[in-house]
Image (cartoon, rainbow, N blue to C red):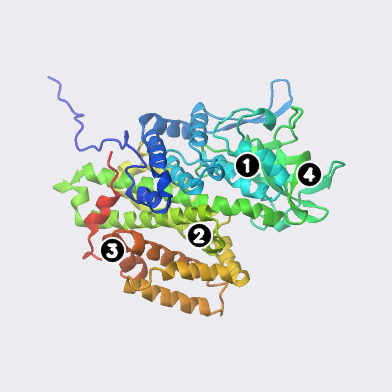
Amino acid sequence: MATGTHAVTNQVPPLVGYDVYGADRVLTEAVERHLDPGLLDVVREELSGLGRTAGSAQAQEWGVLANENPPGLRTHDRYGHRVDEVDFHPSWHRLLGKGVAAGLTAAWARPGGHLRRAAAFVVWTQVEAGHGCPLSMTHAAVPALRTDPELAAEWEPRLTSTVYDQGLRPASEKAGVLFGMGMTEKQGGSDVRANTTVARPLAEDGTYELTGHKWFCSAPMSDGFLVLAQAPGGLTCFLVPRVLEDGTRNVFLIQRLKDKLGNRSNASSEVEFDGTWARRVGDEGRGVRTILEMVAVTRLDCALGAAALMRQAVAQAVHHCTYREAFGGKLIDKPLMRNVLADLALESEAATTLSLRLAAAYDDGSEQERAFLRLALPATKYWVTKRCPPLVVEASECLGGNGYVEESGMPRLLRESPLNSIWEGAGNVQALDILRAMQREPQALNAYLEEIGRARGADHRLDGAIKNLLAELADLDGIEGRARRLAERIALVLQGALLVQYAPPEVADAFCASRLGGDWGAAFGTLPHSLDLASVVERARPVA
C-alpha cells in the first residue's frame, strides 16, 4: 500500500474574500474622524464595496497577472510606420478601469473628495501598486491646469470622469482621459532647471513646438502630459496631448521602457520630442511653480501608497501568525513575535493616520490648512516612504521562508517598497524643501506648531519631544546638514501628536515610549515588554 507523503498541515489559509476597508480599523476610524457626518453612510458603502472587490480572489489575480505580464513597447507597425504604443495585459486595464470608476481621479469633483479618494487609494493600492501611477498623475494634473482657467475648463471634466476610456483618440471624443508627466532629463534629474528641452512659439497664441528628450516620462499611453521646457521667457510648463484634435498622432517618440526593480506592471519611459505640438500652461518662466502644484499632490500619493504597502504587509504578517503554529502554539501568542507584530502595526497605524490627516487638510482648503501642508507634506513624504522598505522586510520575515516565495505576494510588496521614497523628489529634496518652507513661509511653521500644540500635556514623552524639536528649530548652525534629522523629528512628533489625540491608549503609549521616548532598539520587535502589545496586534488583525 502506498504511503501518503504530502499531507498538508499547519499551512495558513489565503487572506482572501474579505473587505480590505472594513477590516482596517485605523483607516475606517480616520475616515469617520475627518469626513462630514452627512456623507458617512454613502462613503462607507462606497469604500466597503471597493474593499470587498480589493479582497476578492479575482482582483488579487489581476494584480498577479499584471505583474507577471509587464507592458511591451511597439515602436512601429508591420508596415514600418511609427506608432509608439505600449501594450498591457488585460488585467492592467481591469485594475485601471476599476480605479477610475471608484473615483481615484475624481477628488476635485466630489464633496469630501480628497479624504474619500485617499482612503480608496490606500484600499486599491493593496491589490496592485503599479497602476496607481496614471491614477495619481491624472488626479494631480488638475491643480496645475487650474493656473490656466481656459485649459482647466476644457480638460478638468475629462480628468475627473469616472469612465476609463481606453485607446488613443482625440481627447474631445473620449468620456474620460488619463494624464502623465515628464519633468526629468538625463543631465538634470531632480534639478529640473537644468532641462534642455526647447519650446519654440508657434503662430497661434499659447502654442509651441517642443524639441528634446525626457529621461523619465510616466504612463506613456496617457491622453496628455504635463512637461517642462525652456521657452524664450524661461522654464515653462506645457500640456502635450498624445493625439491632436484632427486625429493625427502628436510627435511622441517612445525610445524605450525602463527596466525597473519593482512597479513592473507600469510603463515608465524615455520619450523624444521632435517638433511636438504643445499648449502653454501658465506664464512663461513660471514652469516650476506651475508644475509644483501637481508635484505636491503626487507627494501625498507617495505617502498614501507607502501606507497602503505597509498595511498590506502587516495584514499578511498578522494573518499568517494567527494561524501558523510553531514550538507548541500559535505564532501570534509567542511574546517575541507579538513584539515584532506590534511594532510593525504601530508604524503602519502612524503612517495611515498622518496621511489621512493631510488628505483632510486638502478638503478643508483654508489658509491655515494650506500653510500646514506646506511643511507637513514634505516631512510626511520623507518619513513615511522611508519607513516602508524596512517594515516590508520585517513583515516578510514573519512568514519565514514562505515570505521569500513569489506566491506569497510579499516579494512584490518588497520590490515596490522603495519606489515612493524615490518618486516625486527623493529624501534630500524633501528635507531641503522643509527648510525652504520654514525660511520663506513662516506661517507654515506656525500652522505646524499649532497642530502639534493641540496634544501638549497628554503625554510627557511627546512633550519632551516637542521641546527638543523647538530647540533644534532654533539652532540654525549647520541646518542644511541636519535637514534629514529635522525632517524625521517633524514627522515623528506630528505622528505622536495625532496618535495621542485619536488612537487607543495602548497604541499612543507604545508609539510615544518607542519613537519619542527612546525606549526602542534599532530593529522592529524591540518595544518595551511591559506595554499592552496584544491589544496593538489585535487592532491590526484583518478580520476576513
Question: Amino acid under label 4?
Answer: Thr
Q: Which residue is mark 1?
A: 180
- Residue 312: give x, y in percent of width and height: 37, 45
Label 2 residue SS: helix
Could you tell which of marks 2 and 1 lies nearer the N-terminus? 1
Question: Amino acid under label 1?
Answer: Gly
Label 1 residue SS: strand
C-alpha distance separating marks 4 and 1? 18 Å
Q: Which residue is mark 2?
A: 382
Q: Is residue 500 above or below residue 296?
A: below
- Residue 117: give x, y in percent of width and height: 48, 44
Could you tell which of marks 3 and 4 lies nearer the N-terminus? 4
Q: Which residue is mark 4?
A: 211
C-alpha distance separating marks 1 and 3? 43 Å
User: On the rendered image, what quadrant is the N terminus found in?
Assistant: top left
Q: Which residue is mark 3?
A: 527
Estimate how packed mark 4 is, as few (under 14), some (14 to 19) or many (20 or more) residues with alpha carbons within 10 Å: some
